[in-house]
Image (spheres, helix red, strand yellow):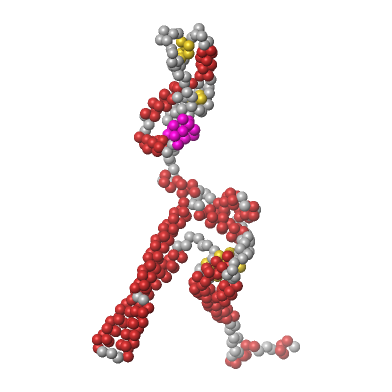
Amino acid sequence: MPLLKRKPFSLLEPPKDLDPKEKIFQIRFTKEIFRDYQYPFCMTILEYLKRVNLYRQRLWTCKVSGKSNLTFEEALVSEHNAMEKAQKLPAELMAYVLRMTQYNDGNTGVPVKYPIDDLLLRPAGDDPALSKRPLLATDFRVPRYSVGDLLMVSLVTWGEYLCDFLEMTKIEDLASNISTVRRGYYGLLDTAIKLKVLRELVEEAVTTSAIRELLIERVDQKQALTATRKKSIRAEKEEQNLNPETGAENKKEQIDGVQDGGGSIDDQVRGTEEVDKNNISRGKTDGKQHLVRKLDTEYEKLSIRSSPLGKDRDYNRYWFFRREGRIFVENADSREWGYYSTKEELDALIDSLNMKGIRERALKKQLEKCYSKISNALEKRSKDIAHKMLLEEAVLRRSTRVRAQPKDNPSMAFLKYVNKWKDN
């Protein structure tokens, strides 16, 4: 049934006391019945005229297709045509339509609003004629599957690409250097500007599908390593629970007895067996601990992004990167940075944090938790720097050595003779 102003519309019920021989007015396309105006209630003819006039106005909407601005009769024809097309729905669209129908909220009286999914559209008789789509040309000089790669690098130099990229970013302090880059003087840019450019390029690269696929692969590998690491730690704890300290002390006494040579031969044999079992158990434990440390190292290599160790009372953020061997400190507005590079500074930092504060308490706990890892990295960096300085000093000493002047050979002294009498 067509909708009136996108709302359901009900037809009139026929009169209940209608005489079969009575003359009536009937609307052709709705079959609604109105009495002759000779009937005592002469308002029926007026109702008939009002109803016919309403049906002729373009206020109606096709309930099936959602087409609007139609007369009532046009909407009826549109619904009929739409129902016929629905019977011819392609099999590949059947699942989509059924799913859409299943999860509909029950209101199949709300008309369809265009646009809809293109696969659901079928040509209708009253649709405007569409021109035939032209054929694609495929006479490329490269294979068709390589066209995308060609378009990506077509005749664009690094400088041009960088200039285009800086224009797209619309960052004022970067865009002001486009002319310098375009002239080929990228090396003259300030270091801070170069770092900003690199940061923007990295952030843009992260959004590409290639980097996304790599990140997804890294996440899957990290999850697998996490599961393996938890399994190893759980197995190690279970083994420790099976070997209580009392058993370890008994083994120690038996081992001491074997070493002292006391006791009977049977006791010595049992003690030797206990020593062997203890060595095997210790070897298994050491092997599992080594596996856990190896898993931790692999886990850090797969880190996608780093999180700060925590914040101090002033909201300064503390970062640790193993490759740098330093603790970096970033102020609240990210405009200033500093760092700690020695174990002594790390100890002083931990002692300076107030456990009564929420942020500094959390930061101190994190630093204590990672103390071994951080302190080892700091000491390694200090040793590397000291070793590098020694090498540079050795190279400098070798390069500043001056060869001694050769001594005069007495047999060649005559070459320095000057005839002073000739000058006089």
Above or below residue 364? Residue 146 is above
Q: Residue at x 53, y 50 (%)?
A: 156
Quadrant position of the C terminus in the picture: bottom right
Q: Judge by depth and name the residue closer to the eye, 205 or 403.
A: 205
Horizontal side, residue 127 vs residue 279: left or right: right
Above or below residue 47? Residue 394 is below
Task: Say whether residue 118 is visible.
Answer: no
Q: Residue furthest bottom?
A: 410
Q: Judge by depth and name the residue closer to the eye, 94 or 55.
A: 55
Horizontal side, residue 246 vs residue 367: left or right: left
Quadrant position of the N terminus in the picture: top left
Q: Is residue 146 magenta?
A: no
Q: Residue at x 51, y 28 (%)?
A: 6
Horizontal side, residue 221 vs residue 400: left or right: left
Q: Is residue 109 magenta?
A: yes
Q: Judge by depth and name the residue closer to the eye, 147 or 337.
A: 337
Q: Judge by depth and name the residue closer to the eye, 246 or 414.
A: 246
Q: Residue furthest right?
A: 424
Task: Say whether residue 358 is visible.
Answer: yes
Horizontal side, residue 407 vs residue 122: left or right: right
Task: Give percent across and percent down for residue 86.
Answer: 39, 29
Q: Residue at x 29, y 84 (%)?
A: 271
Q: Residue at x 40, y 37 (%)?
A: 102
Q: Main secondary structure of the magenta part?
A: loop
Task: Give percent across and percent down for residue 98.
Answer: 39, 36
Task: Give percent across and percent down for residue 176.
Answer: 65, 53
Q: Which residues are magenta?
A: 105-121
Task: Give percent across and percent down for residue 65.
Answer: 45, 29
Would you identify the image quadrant in which residue 329 lies? bottom right
Would you identify the image quadrant in which residue 121 lies? top left
